[in-house]
Image (tube, helix red, strand yellow):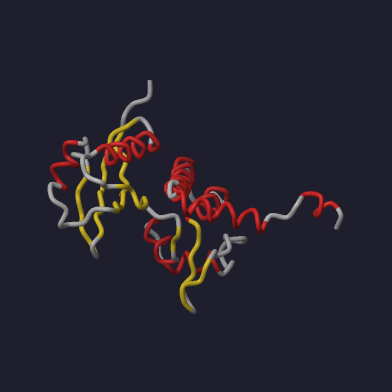
Amino acid sequence: MKKSKPYSFTLILKNVDEKTENLEDSLYEANCDDALIQFKHGAVYLEFNRKATSLEEAVISAIKDVQSCTLEADIASIAPENFVTESEIAKRLEISRQTVSLWIKGKRRKFFPQPIMRLAEKSSLWKWNEVCIWLYENKIITNKNLVEDALFFSNMSAALEERDSKAREIRHHLLQRISVNECAKRSR
């Protein structure tokens, strides 16, 4: 039987704010007594340190607990986020930013994942799960759980977005429009 251990993650709530009446009591009564409530820029963050036999079990139980509270609280997103900057990669790995920069430039290792987006002239974003896979394949990290956790957070974020039926409908419509028919592919 797997042993329980603590897992740390953050749930960002929507439909509530710091002025919501009985927020703390409602969350406590919904078994969220293992979360620290934070407020920033009008958002409510629940920083969990939840014991479970797996990360997935911890996160899913926390989401269900939040949704069972008497308030209209819902989950907007989960952290740690899957999109990371060069600085965030260094911070998560507890290494220098210069080391990460050398990986990105291909001066220390080859084939670092391509950025998925540029925020500004000098700031790019990478997918954390792709970075973790690269780190593991290059034997920079040896803990396969780090890769699995990064993939889980990425997929959980996507699953949370899929719950918005209007957004899901629009995305699926757009996917149909950009999909290339298999017959058209073969005739090329």
Indicate whether 32 appears above or below 180: above
Name the quadrant of the N terminus: top left
x then y, percent, for residue 135: 52, 52
Please give left or right for residue 70 compared with residue 55 in the image.
left
Residue 139 vertical placement versus 70 (above, below): below
Question: Which image quadrant: the C terminus?
Answer: bottom right
Q: Is residue 12 above or below residue 53?
A: below
The residue most toward the bottom is: 121
At a point 48% along the width and 77% down the height, the residue shown is 122
Residue toward you, 174 or 156:
174
Image quadrant of residue 5? top left
Q: Is residue 146 visible?
A: no
Residue 28 or residue 72, whichever sits in front: 72
Q: Quadrant of residue 32?
A: top left
**Is there any visible trace of residue 42 in the rendered image?**
yes
Residue farthest to the right, as pictured: 187
Q: Position of residue 160 (x, y in %)?
A: 42, 47
Q: Residue at x 27, y 47 (%)?
A: 73
| Residue 6 position within the rendered picture, expressed as x and y whole percent measured from the top left | 29, 37
Residue 123, given in percent of the width and then of the height, sits at: 46, 73
Residue at the (45%, 69%) spot, across then down: 98
